[in-house]
Every structure is written in structure tokens, then in C-alpha cells.
Amino acid sequence: MNFDLADIRAFVAVADLGSITAASATLHLSQSALSRRIDKLEDALGVALFVRTTRKVELTSVGRSFVPKARNVLNELESALLGIRDVAERVSGEVTIACVPSAVAYFLPGVVREYHRQYPGIRLRVIDESSSEILLKVTRGEADFGLTYIGVNEADIEFYPVMQDPFVVACPKAHPLAGRKRIKWEELGQQDYITLAQGSGNRLLIDQALAQSSARPRWFCEVHHVPALVSLVEAGVGLGVVPRLAMPPDGHPTLVSVPLHEPEVTRTLGLIKRRGRALTAAAQLFHDLLVRSQG
């Protein structure tokens, strides 16, 4: 057949982006050159892959069925190249990972270091955003995959659980409760309590856990982001509840993490990606390396 890999790349780019203009910018081709590649592929296959109007480009039914086949061809080639050490050192590309800020320090440094050692020509972009933003980034294709705690019930998202992360009391070492093995939620009602704002994914998990409980503490200060809450606790302003991964490691000079109970509250951190959409070979390698690091 008279077509090549460049024509397949052009087809996949237009299919993913739904636009000749956007695909040509991504591939650094003129729109006319990109259109010629699509025409060449359609002529070789003897079918129309797109319905093109002056306003938009849509896949035909044949085009939709050809997308996963075309993507597999490109991924297999990329995998073959990345599997060869001397070639891998010259491979370029980019992988985008979206990760909740509280999990960045725990999960990523070692994996990023090892991945860069193996594939120095591939650039990594880490988007540290809220859980809702990460879900949007992955759904829209702006990130190859995400590391977050929401997405389990999303029809278009595959969720692979990695670890359980309990919520703890962020407490100054000088505080009377700092030496406790566990703290009950109702005990926080007698403390100056700092909370996360409505709309936060972590706040939602806490509210759901305490929905049937009378132990909900009354807050006097509200913040939008976990790091801000931890900073206020460290300054001695009050106590707050945060995921364990958001706290500094044991041995911090001024802060401790005290487990909570009655009720215990946890979140499940996991890797998310678009359902039915294969990762690029470069992204799959990073994904697998991250999974193995927790095994």
C-alpha cells in the first residue's frame, strides 16, 4: 500500500484533535501538507476516513474503527525504539503527568530520576493541580495520565488503585495532643480548628465520612489548599485534618501527624487514564515504572 508512518501520524493527530488546524500546528506541518497526507492514506485504503466541511472534521464509521489500529501501529514502533538502549538515549518526546500536590513528593522524585536516567531525551511535564482539575486534564487529553483520588465512578476513566492514604491531624509538636496515639473527631471540637474550603476534593471526602456523625468540628478558619493549612498549623494558629501524604516526613522539627478515629477517614490514590485510549509507549513506560515503584 502506498502510505507511510507519517500519514498514519497525521491521521491520528486529526482524529484526536478533531481539527486540521490544531493537528497541523501539533505536527509542525502546513494545513495543505497535512490534508495531502490524509488524502494519500484514504486513497491507499480506498475508503473515506473523515467527513470534512468548512467548519469541522468528523470521523466516518470506518475512520473510528481505524483509530485504535493506527494508534497501535505507532505505539508498537515507539515501544520497539524505546526498548533499545542505544536508540533510547536519542529518543525525544514528552510525557505529561497530572498529580495532586500532596502526592508529588511521595511518588514522583525517584521515578522521575530513574526515567530520566533511562530516557534522557524525553521531557516530563508534571501538572500539580487539584483533583477536579486533574480529572479534566486527563479527560481532555491534556495529560497522558493522572495520579489522584477521584475518577473511580467516571465512565470514561480507568482507575488503577495504588495506595490508601489516611487523613490525620496536623499538629504542632508543642501542642498537648501531639503525644497522643489517636485523636477522636469529637475532640477537635474543643480546639481551634482550621478546615479546607467547600469544593475541595479532600473536604468532600471528610464531609461524606462525617455526614451521619455529630462529631463534626466547628471551624474558625478556612483555606483552599492543603499546603496553606499545614503552614498555618506549623505557625501555631490551630489544628487541621489533612491527608497523611501532605504532611512532612516523621522527624520534622515542629510538626507531627496524629491518626484519627471515630470515624477513620481515608482516600484511595490511584492512576487514571482515558478508557479505551492506549498510552503512548513513552507514557506507558513511565506509568509502569511508577506502578513498580509501589510494588
Image (tube, rainbow, N blue to C red):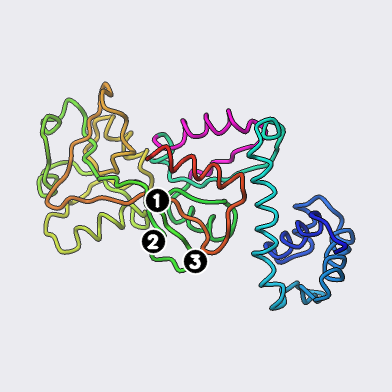
Q: Quadrant of the N terminus?
A: bottom right
Instruction: Please tell me whether residue 133 is drawn above or below residue 241 in the rendered image.
Output: below
Are there few (<14), some (14-19), or many (20+) residues within 10 Å of tag 1? many
Residue at 33 percent across and 33 percent down: it is: 231
Instruction: Please tell me whether residue 63 is drawn above or below residue 278 in the rendered image.
Output: below
Where on the picture, by quarter, is residue 6? bottom right
Q: 233 left or right of 52? A: left
Alpha carbon distance from label 2 to label 3: 10 Å
Q: Amino acid at mark 2?
A: Val
Where on the picture, by quarter, is residue 11? bottom right
Element under label 3?
Answer: loop
**Residue 270: which numbered mark, if any?**
1
Q: Amino acid at mark 3?
A: Asp
- Residue at the extreme top of the image, as rendered: 253
Q: Is residue 109 magenta?
A: yes
Residue at 37 percent across and 40 percent down: it is: 295
